[in-house]
Amino acid sequence: MIHASKRIAGGAGLAAVLVKRAPTLELDWDTRSKSRFSATDSTGREIGVVLPRGTTLRGGDVLVAEDGTLVRVIASAQPVLQVRHCAEHGSPFDLLRAAYHLGNRHVPLELQPALLQFEPDPVLAEMLRRQHLIVTEAQAAFEPEGGAYGEGAGHGHHHGHDHAHDHHEPAPVRKPLAIPVKAHDDGHVHGPGCGHDHGHDHKH
């Protein structure tokens, strides 16, 4: 095993050709959020990654091994839930509200212009569907926003290391998403084009 203890964020300052030719490590978010782990690169070499506590790796980062060789990090596709607003029965503001409530619960959350991504959670998925949001399962690279997600709250696991920014108490166990459910008095009908099941009855 060869060790790598230096991270170059986004490969900054390195010649593009060197980065392109470097062996790669495909890692999911769970692994990239750890500061110490071992993995096998694209050449079959086992890499022992030892980074400062609290460090997280992003796709495009480059690791420098103890022999001076480079290893490019790739964010591997993993199971995620993608949340989009329902153009027929909602508005883009529904997505903004969902991001606020998920963020309040320290759910690791990736923000994109038209969707949110987070790790599979059936309870949250159902709550969001009740808000006319379209929630779909997908396999995609997961790059959550920086912030207070690192404590492991909402993950269902703990990475066993301290973060330099952990100056507050760990978040309490996440409670069910408490977004007020809209009253369905607008008489709308969810047809085949709605693309999602809300899991609740409507008066038609």
Image: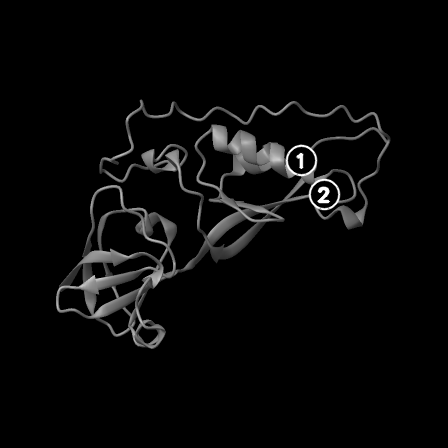
2 vs 129: above or below: below
Image location of residue 15, percent across then percent down: 32, 72
What's under tag 2, amino acid-wise? Answer: Cys
Q: Which mark is residue 45?
A: none
Q: Are marks 1 and 2 in contact (CB under 8 Å)?
A: yes
Quadrant where the C terminus is found in the figure:
top right
**What residue do we see at 63% from left, 49% from top?**
114
Quarter occupied by residue 16: bottom left
- Up the image or down, 28 lies above or below 110; here it is below
**Which quadrant would the N terminus be assigned to in this image?**
bottom left
Instruction: Look at 65% across and 22% down and name the residue there.
Output: 180
Give the Cα separation between the discs numbered 1 and 2.
9 Å
Front of the two marks 1 and 2: 1
In the rendered image, the residue lying farthest to the front is: 13
Circle 2 — which element? loop
Of residue 190 and residue 164, the one placed in the foreground of this image is 164
Q: Identify the residue under disc 2.
A: 86
Determine the image quadrant of residue 59: bottom left
Q: Is residue 127 above or below residue 159?
A: above
Sequence-wise, which precedes: disc 1 or disc 2? 2
Q: Position of residue 74 (x, y in %)?
A: 37, 62
Q: Count neighbours of disc 1 (C-alpha within 10 A) and say few if under 14, some if 14 to 19, many if 20 or more.
A: some
Q: Residue at x 30, y 68 (%)?
A: 14
Q: Which residue is mark 1?
A: 94
Residue nearer the viewer, 100 or 131: 100
Q: Quadrant of residue 116?
A: top right
Residue 78: where, in percent of width, then height? 44, 55
